[in-house]
Image: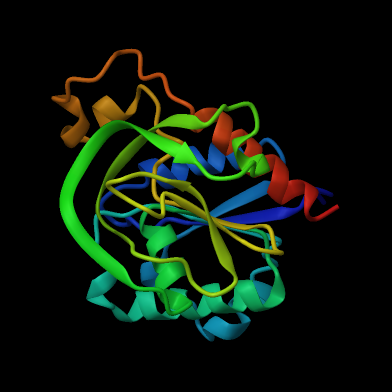
């Protein structure tokens, strides 16, 4: 039996795509035993799902769906997230997942004109998830909905004019939400037609890979 901790990656873009979840799983494989799950299958009793699933760390992928649609499986996943915060399960929530985390904890969302591509964000403070990056980071974004303000107990750790809550973290727990996609690499041009025609430099170079490595390390170290 593996002695490594177990990370569950919720693949929120099923059945359309598992690209983002797959990339996140590969990153977490460095420090965890990982499993991808499809939220459309439901969570049973959401409040006890984390313990029943033997989940040591939780990862939420992005999705083309709207958090504001409030589909039944999304509401169940919100309950899972509230349980994760209540029990201190180390968590990384990406894009849609970031929005769902905020909504689950009562924070407002807004919709703005969609943007896709590489954009600079400003770092706030010296959070270790951005270790090795000075003041500004270049990251891939693909969204229109965004978090308007952080939920109680969280603080902003990265921002931009377009999206004030580019990244947030819990004030005392290893729980992060990021609006951008740190896992995107060159393969996104083949995986997503929205990226295929973009005028962005190739190869796709940005700070997301370093941010993701930092996040994996921080979540793993929180379990030591």
| Residue 42 appears in the rendering | no
Residue, far top: 202
Q: Position of residue 106 (x, y in %)?
A: 43, 79
Seen from the viewer's position, the closer of residues 131 and 27 is: 131
Using the image, determine if residue 137 lies above or below residue 67. above
Using the image, determine if residue 110 lies above or below residue 221. below
| Residue 111 appears in the rendering | yes
Tell me how the rendering is colored. rainbow
Seen from the viewer's position, the closer of residues 201 and 130 is: 130
Q: Position of residue 63 (x, y in %)?
A: 31, 54
Q: Position of residue 92 (x, y in %)?
A: 56, 54
Left/right placement of residue 171 relative to residue 137 reads right
* Numbered marks: total: 0
Residue located 21% across and 31% down the image: 195
- Quarter occupied by residue 108: bottom left
Left/right placement of residue 63 relative to residue 53 reads left
Left/right placement of residue 66 relative to residue 180 reads left
Residue located 46% across and 36% down the image: 183
- Quarter occupied by residue 42: bottom left
Using the image, determine if residue 126 lies above or below residue 38. above
Q: Position of residue 121 (x, y in %)?
A: 40, 37
Residue located 52% across and 29% down the image: 209
Seen from the viewer's position, the closer of residues 136 and 65 is: 136
């Amino acid at each position: 039996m593996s002695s490594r901790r177990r990370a569950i990656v919720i693949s929120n873009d099923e059945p359309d795509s598992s690209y983002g979840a797959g990339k996140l799983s590969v990153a977490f494989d460095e420090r965890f035993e990982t499993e991808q799950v499809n939220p459309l299958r439901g969570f049973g009793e959401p409040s006890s799902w984390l313990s029943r699933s033997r989940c040591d760390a939780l990862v939420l992928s992005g999705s083309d769906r709207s958090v504001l649609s409030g589909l039944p499986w999304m509401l169940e996943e919100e309950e899972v997230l509230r349980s994760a915060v209540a029990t201190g399960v180390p968590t990384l929530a990406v894009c849609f997942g970031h929005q769902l985390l905020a909504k689950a904890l009562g924070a407002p969302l807004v919709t703005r004109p969609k943007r896709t591509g590489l954009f600079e964000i400003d770092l706030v403070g010296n959070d270790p998830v951005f270790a090795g990056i000075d003041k500004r980071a270049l990251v891939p974004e693909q969204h229109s909905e965004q978090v308007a303000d952080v939920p109680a107990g969280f603080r902003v750790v990265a921002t931009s004019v377009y999206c004030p809550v580019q990244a947030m973290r819990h004030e005392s727990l290893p729980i992060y939400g990021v609006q951008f996609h740190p896992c995107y690499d060159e393969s996104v041009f083949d995986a997503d037609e929205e990226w295929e025609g973009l005028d962005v430099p190739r190869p796709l170079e940005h700070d997301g890979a370093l941010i993701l490595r930092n996040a994996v390390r921080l979540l793993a170290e929180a379990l030591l």
